[in-house]
Amino acid sequence: MQHVKELSAKLEQKRGFSLKMLVGLDGFVDEIVHLVDKRQDFASFSRIRTIGEYGERMSKAAGLSTNVEMVTVQTKLGGNGPILSNALLEYGVRLSYVGALGVPDIHPVFRPMAEKAEVVYSLCDAGHTDAMEFEDGKIMLGKHACLSCLTWDVFKKGMGGAEKIAELVAECQLFGMENWTMLPHMSEIWQGIIDEVFPLLPEKAEKPLAFFDLADPEKRTKEDISRAMKLIGGFEKKFRTILGLNEKEVYEIADVLGVEYAKGDLQAVVMAVYGALGIYCLMVHPVRSACCAIGGEYFYTDGPFCQKPVLTTGAGDNLNAGFCLAQALGLDPLASLTLGVCTSGYYVRNAKSPTFDQVITFAKDWSEGRV
């Protein structure tokens, strides 16, 4: 736990930081729901606790039918971009957002985030997700149709043209375009940025960071995923590119890329995918840990696992926020992973993202066995 103890001191030295970031592109209204197992009365019920229990109930309904009651426990901002951004704003980052937050008016769930952001470009209506929470994971049921209108032309026009995009990006230490899977035209947007914005960006002694999160690409074709990987690699020309994946996703990407690895060996698959992509950093977050490859080396940390989380939807995005902040602050890879798991660990216990002070306290408590 020495690296956890050291994180607090490293963060104390970074107080008063000033970082600018531009993030997009999705936006969802998330309804966090619990599923009723047995209802005692109008006000009380027992939950379906695990995905396995839910699966059993669904299997028994095959050839028949069934009814499952959903109880909304919270309605909140959702989407990889907004949750990532909300966490970064809590940390004090000067952040601008572009994405699907509602038109002509921003949806109420995004207004607190929008009020804290420096600039917001809302280009279309938000999607909707019923996030079924279980003790061992979550199932996300999404409605994404409104996101199909987010094309390169809409993106470029909504932000004031390629020159304005370049101006905004040039001011930032990190640029992130999240949720490739659910945005059907994201690859075209990335291609447009490479073709039209890159020539307008100044050369910098140290390239800024670009962060990408695919958001469960299983439903996309192998050809689509392969093209996306090449485009992400193309961002290395102007950025130090970070791709964040969960454990399921890294094996899917490995299969698409055709790399060889030992089954069940996380380090082997991470290093194989990292080598094939040719990017600055590949970061992977299983449920109980996090790891990354940077500079040809592999780094790993366990996380502060929570047996009964209050909220898991958005945990990965909070981990990404902590990792991205640490990287933007110039922290080393292990410290970056540690800030990531601390950010996520705080979030799942408190159903909200931590402030800078709160994550320092959380890291101290974890290192001293109080978490």
Image (cartoon, rainbow, N blue to C red):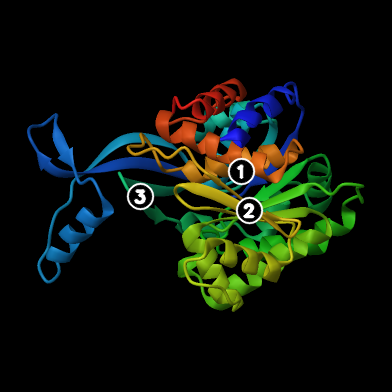
Quadrant for the N terminus in the image: top right
Where is residue 38 drawn, in percent x and y? Answer: 10, 42
Residue farthest to the front, as pictured: 2
Question: What crowding class fits label 3: few (fewer than 14 Cα within 10 Å), some (14-19), or many (20 or more)?
Answer: some
Q: Earlier in the sequence, mark 1 or mark 3?
A: 3
SS label for mark 3: strand
Report if the CB atoms under discs 1 and 3 are less than 8 Å apart: no
Quadrant for the C terminus in the image: top left
Which mark identifies residue 292?
2
Amino acid type of the residue tagged 1 in the rendering: Leu
Front position in the image: 278 or 73: 278
Which residue shows up at 53% across the image and 60% down it?
A: 148
| Foreground tag (2 vs 3) | 2
Check the image and report above or below for 11 versus 284: above
Report if the CB atoms under discs 2 and 1 are less than 8 Å apart: yes
Q: Identify the image quadrant of residue 144.
A: bottom left
Asked whether, in this view, residue 33 is left or right of residue 263, the answer is left
Q: What is the spatial separation of the Cα atoms under label 1 and label 3, in whole angstroms?
A: 23 Å
Front position in the image: 179 or 99: 179
Residue 350 appears in the figure: yes
Asked whether, in this view, residue 143 is left or right of residue 220, the answer is left
Task: Quickly name the residue at label 1.
Answer: 337
Q: What is the spatial separation of the Cα atoms under label 2 and label 1, in whole angstroms?
A: 8 Å
Amino acid type of the residue tagged 3 in the rendering: Lys
Amino acid type of the residue tagged 2 in the rendering: Cys
Residue 26 appears in the figure: no
Q: Identify the image quadrant of residue 296.
A: bottom right
Task: Quickly name the residue at label 3.
Answer: 138
Q: What is the spatial separation of the Cα atoms under label 2 and label 3, in whole angstroms?
A: 24 Å
